[in-house]
Image: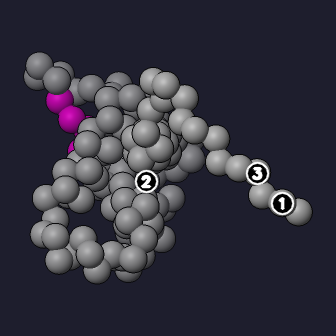
Amino acid sequence: MVPEPRRPPRPGALPSAFCAVVAERRLLWNLAYCLLDSVGDAEFAVQETYTRWYTMPDDEQERVERPLTWLVGTLVRICVDLRESPPRRAHGRVVAPAGHRDPAGPPSRRFGVWRDAPKL
């Protein structure tokens, strides 16, 4: 089989590195939203994950073999911490309704395995 010749980039096309970062962020956001069921909390978790990555010293970043694996692991730990923390308050009121019960059970039972996972 003869490989296809490489096509020249389309004018105005985005660089592939940019597309990879956008896809990575979308993956992290979707995972956070599935774990937290909140757009605001998912955005906060993704921002916190990227903050931890970009404030990490360069020598530590270079030791990470698979950055996406590190980002996902960090994001999951942040989401677990958010689920187990007391409800956040906005303007003096509790954000989640007081009688709200999660049908999947308490977060400590669902996410206990992730909390004990070794850091990457």
Residue at point 50%, 59% (across, down): 110
Is residue 7 found left or right of 17 in the rendered image? right
Q: Which structural element holds mark 2?
A: helix
Q: Residue 66 carries which label?
A: none
Where is mark 1, residue-wise?
2
**Residue denoted by label 2:** 107
Kindly indicate the quadrant of the structure image that contains residue 86: top left
Q: What stretch is highlighted in magenta?
A: 85-89
Residue 54: x, y in percent?
Answer: 19, 56
The amino acid sitting under disc 1 is Val
Q: Residue at x 56, y 47 (%)?
A: 104
Please give the residue where the numbered disc 3 appears in the rendered image. Answer: 4
Identify the image quadrant of the N terminus: bottom right
Question: Is the Cβ of the residue at disc 3 closer than 8 Å to that at disc 1?
Answer: yes
Q: Where on the picture, by quarter, is residue 120? A: bottom left
Q: Earlier in the sequence, mark 2 or mark 3?
A: 3
Residue 114 painted magenta = no
| Residues at marks 3 and 1, CA–CA distance in whole angstroms | 6 Å
In 3D space, how far apart are the residues under numbered discs 2 and 3 (Cα atoms)?
51 Å
Q: Quick one: 24 or 87, which is closer to the camera?
A: 24
Q: What element carries label 3?
A: loop
